[in-house]
Image: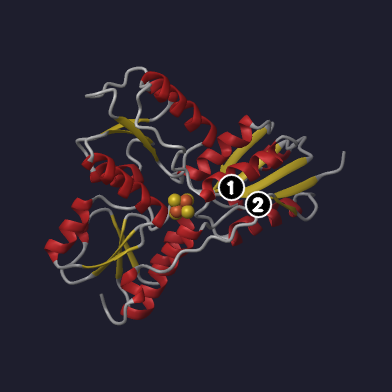
């Protein structure tokens, strides 16, 4: 059999990441360095290091931001308490929360106001989950996987609904939702999960190339939820092996032994240059140029945060 490299499409930057990275770039341009960013603007080491070199300062919490400074909130969203703290400190804030995450926050507020308890499907400790939970901490119960549903306890089983993190595995989440519906037949139901278009499309595209692949290489950082999911999805779809790397330097040539068909994709926070680096590495190791298989065309884009659209400093 001849060797081949297939590039999944869509892959890489989603509209929310593109907007968040552009937000920091524009803030640096308009207001000058340093621009503070709470948490990683997006979960990609290379993006963060590049912005750091241009004057962005990444902090874990607002107490590391000096009075009067400008701070950007990351694409994953923040709890209302963070907005309140920033306002109390008089910080200039720019909110780069992805509009699709904001939509989940708004749903959480709406259900909580109606007295409906919310089962939030997501990963404990992920910034998006912390932000969403912060909207209605008394009303939200977190479950991470289908097995967690069994032990779930709520105040009133007839007034329960669910929300999800935007970057979960589509298939595993469907299983979790089905168990929630079984356990709470009177669920205040919703027609679908909150997994975003970009996560869904990247999972569908990697599934499409994985079944025939000996090895799928997913470019993405270890803390990128959607990148880690792509590795799992590739394996479940039939790839003989699937590995996540931050960049081509992390590929172990031993992975390529006996491998004919390689699939390549990348998470929603990954610059295309890193994917090109992986393709170049494969070519240097005897593989032909990659051929792209486009499963879905994406046209989604989001406008800039209000604070950057308005004239002058926020
Ligand atoms: Fe928004 Fe989805 Fe991208 Fe997250 S992965 S920033 S929710 S579009």
Q: Report x, y in % for residue 240.
A: 69, 31
Q: Is residue 100 left or right of residue 229?
A: left
Q: Which residue is mark 1?
A: 201
Instruction: Please identify the quadrant where the N terminus is shown.
Output: top right
Image point 32% across, 39% down: which residue? 125
Compared with 122, 25 (above or below) is below
**Do we see residue 44 in this rendering?**
no
CB under 8 Å between discs 1 and 2: yes
Image point 38% across, 51% down: which residue? 101
How dense is the environment of label 1, judged by Cα within 10 Å: few (below 14), some, or many (20 and up)? some
Q: Residue furthest left?
A: 88
Q: Which residue is mark 2?
A: 296
Q: What is the image's colouring?
A: secondary structure
Q: Report x, y in % for residue 290.
A: 75, 54
Q: Report x, y in % for residue 10.
A: 62, 53
Q: Nearer the viewer, residue 298 or 66?
A: 298
Q: Is residue 305 left or right of residue 263?
A: left
Query: Secondary structure beneath disc 1?
Result: helix
Compared with 210, 290 (above or below) is below
Q: Is residue 57 left or right of residue 16?
A: left
Quarter occupied by residue 98: bottom left
Query: Secondary structure beneath disc 2?
Result: loop
Image point 21% across, 35% down: which residue? 115
Q: Is residue 207 left or right of residue 71?
A: right
Compared with 201, 41 (above or below) is below
């Amino acid at each position: 059999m001849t060797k081949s490299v297939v590039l999944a499409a869509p892959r890489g930057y989603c509209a929310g990441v593109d907007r968040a990275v552009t937000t920091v770039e524009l803030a640096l341009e308009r207001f000058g360095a340093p621009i503070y960013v709470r948490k990683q603007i997006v979960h990609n080491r290379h993006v963060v290091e590049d912005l750091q070199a241009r004057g962005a300062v990444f902090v874990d919490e607002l107490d590391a931001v000096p009075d009067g400074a400008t701070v950007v909130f990351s694409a994953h969203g923040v709890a209302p308490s963070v907005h309140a703290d920033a306002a109390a400190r008089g910080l200039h804030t720019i909110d780069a929360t992805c509009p699709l995450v904001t939509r989940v926050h708004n749903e959480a507020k709406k259900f909580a106001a109606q007295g409906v308890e919310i089962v939030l499907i997501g990963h404990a400790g992920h910034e998006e989950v912390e932000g969403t939970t912060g909207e209605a901490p008394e009303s939200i119960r977190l479950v991470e996987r289908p097995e967690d549903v069994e032990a779930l306890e709520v105040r009133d089983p007839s007034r329960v609904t669910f929300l999800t993190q935007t970057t979960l595995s589509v298939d595993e989440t469907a299983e979790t939702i089905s168990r929630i519906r079984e356990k709470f037949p009177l669920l205040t139901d919703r027609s679908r999960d909150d997994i975003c278009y970009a996560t869904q499309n990247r999972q569908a595209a990697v599934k499409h190339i994985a079944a025939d692949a000996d090895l799928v290489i997913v470019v993405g950082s270890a803390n990128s939820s959607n990148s880690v999911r792509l590795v799992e999805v590739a394996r479940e779809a039939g790839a003989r092996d699937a590995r996540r790397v931050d960049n081509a330097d992390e590929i172990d040539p031993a992975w390529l032994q006996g491998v004919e068909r390689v699939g390549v994709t990348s998470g929603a926070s990954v610059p295309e240059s890193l994917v090109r680096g992986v393709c170049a590495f494969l070519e240097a190791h005897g593989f032909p140029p990659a051929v792209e298989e486009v499963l879905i065309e994406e046209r989604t884009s989001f406008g800039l945060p209000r604070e950057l659209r308005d004239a002058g400093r926020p």
